[in-house]
């Protein structure tokens, strides 16, 4: 089997920076044509003619529908979807979480994943084509998430949704898997990464003793999007330096 994405079209959400940008770059390098989606995006030009930027707020259903329609319009089809856009507006005790933070986190981290998956799945079924959907979850969806309770709930729900879609879409040859990163050096994780006491506490529980880079998560996404994982569906690939073992 091969890691090549030649002749594939991929949509990557949250692609303007961090994990999403790393995934989009790697996919282009592996031969894919990629639609990079983000609320504010200006990075596609650096990736050449195989990349196309589209501004979309994945916390809004209409934007998710428009995003997939744009990918089909520009590149003629969609074969791969990477749901990566995420938000975590509240960092603190769960009991104090404001309702606005609940709403925003669930809209982007969960509803957006559902809306884009639905649109891509319908497109693939209509074409009678196989496809791969990769959802970026988190180790916070696998275990307790102190100070990130709402975020953790959405990531746990993403895992549940991944498995249900994998079961329902498998007969249509659509594979659906998730990645559960540990601590990654991104803007989203900056509340932990940039806080010495919090980051050191995390790293004490990480056998590899360091924070991941976005490129390391991108490699996992490539595996799940490519034919290298052609018999893998409904799985959660944990990429956390061993944190969940401790």
Image: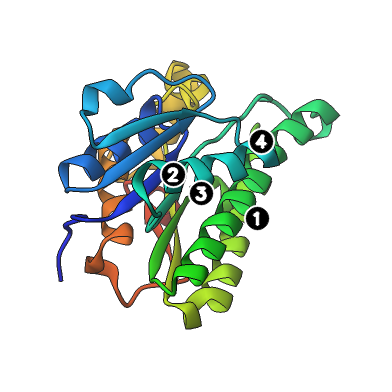
Disc 2 vs disc 1: which is toward the camera?
Answer: 2
Q: Could you say which is closer to the camera, residue 79 or residue 206?
A: 79
Residue 116 placed where, x, y %?
Answer: 57, 50
Q: Residue at x 31, y 26 (%)?
A: 44
Q: Could you say which is closer to the camera, residue 24 or residue 141?
A: 24
Disc 3 vs disc 4: which is toward the camera?
Answer: 4
The residue pinned by badge 4 equals 59
Residue contact at pointers 3 and 4, CB within 8 angstroms: no
Please tell me whether residue 136 is drawn above or below residue 58 in the rendered image: below
Disc 1 vs disc 4: which is toward the camera?
Answer: 4
Residue 228 placed where, x, y %?
Answer: 22, 67
| Colouring mode (rainbow / by chain / secondary structure / one colour) | rainbow
- Which numbered disc flags the more N-terminal residue, 3 or 4? 4
The residue pinned by badge 3 equals 137
Outermost residue toward the bottom in this view: 171
The residue pinned by badge 1 equals 157
Secondary-structure class at tag 2: helix
> Can residue 184 be spotted in the picture?
no
Please tell me whether residue 59 is drawn above or below residue 220 in the rendered image: above
Residue contact at pointers 1 and 4, CB within 8 angstroms: no
What whole-number distance in Å separates the C-alpha atoms at marks 3 and 2?
A: 29 Å
């Amino acid at each position: 089997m091969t890691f090549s994405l030649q002749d594939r079209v991929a949509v990557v959400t949250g692609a303007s920076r961090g994990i999403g940008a790393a995934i989009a770059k790697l996919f282009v390098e592996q031969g894919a044509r990629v639609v990079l989606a983000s609320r504010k995006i200006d990075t596609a030009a650096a990736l050449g003619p195989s990349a196309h930027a589209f501004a979309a707020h994945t916390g809004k259903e209409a934007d998710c529908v428009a995003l997939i329609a744009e990918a089909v319009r520009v590149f003629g089809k969609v074969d791969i979807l990477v749901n990566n856009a995420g938000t975590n507006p509240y960092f603190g005790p769960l009991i104090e979480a404001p309702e606005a933070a609940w709403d925003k986190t669930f809209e982007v981290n969960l509803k957006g994943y559902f809306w884009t998956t639905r649109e891509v799945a319908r497109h693939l079924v209509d074409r009678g084509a196989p496809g791969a959907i990769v959802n970026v979850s988190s180790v916070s969806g696998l275990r307790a998430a102190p100070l990130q309770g709402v975020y953790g709930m959405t990531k746990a729900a993403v895992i549940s949704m991944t498995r249900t879609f994998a079961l329902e879409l498998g007969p249509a040859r659509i594979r659906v898997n998730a990645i559960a990163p540990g601590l990654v050096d991104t803007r989203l994780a900056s509340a932990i990464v940039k806080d010495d006491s919090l980051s050191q506490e995390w790293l004490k529980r990480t056998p590899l003793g360091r924070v991941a880079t976005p490129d390391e998560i991108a490699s996992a996404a490539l595996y799940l999007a490519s034919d290298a994982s052609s018999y893998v569906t409904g799985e959660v690939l944990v990429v956390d330096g061993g944190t969940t073992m401790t």
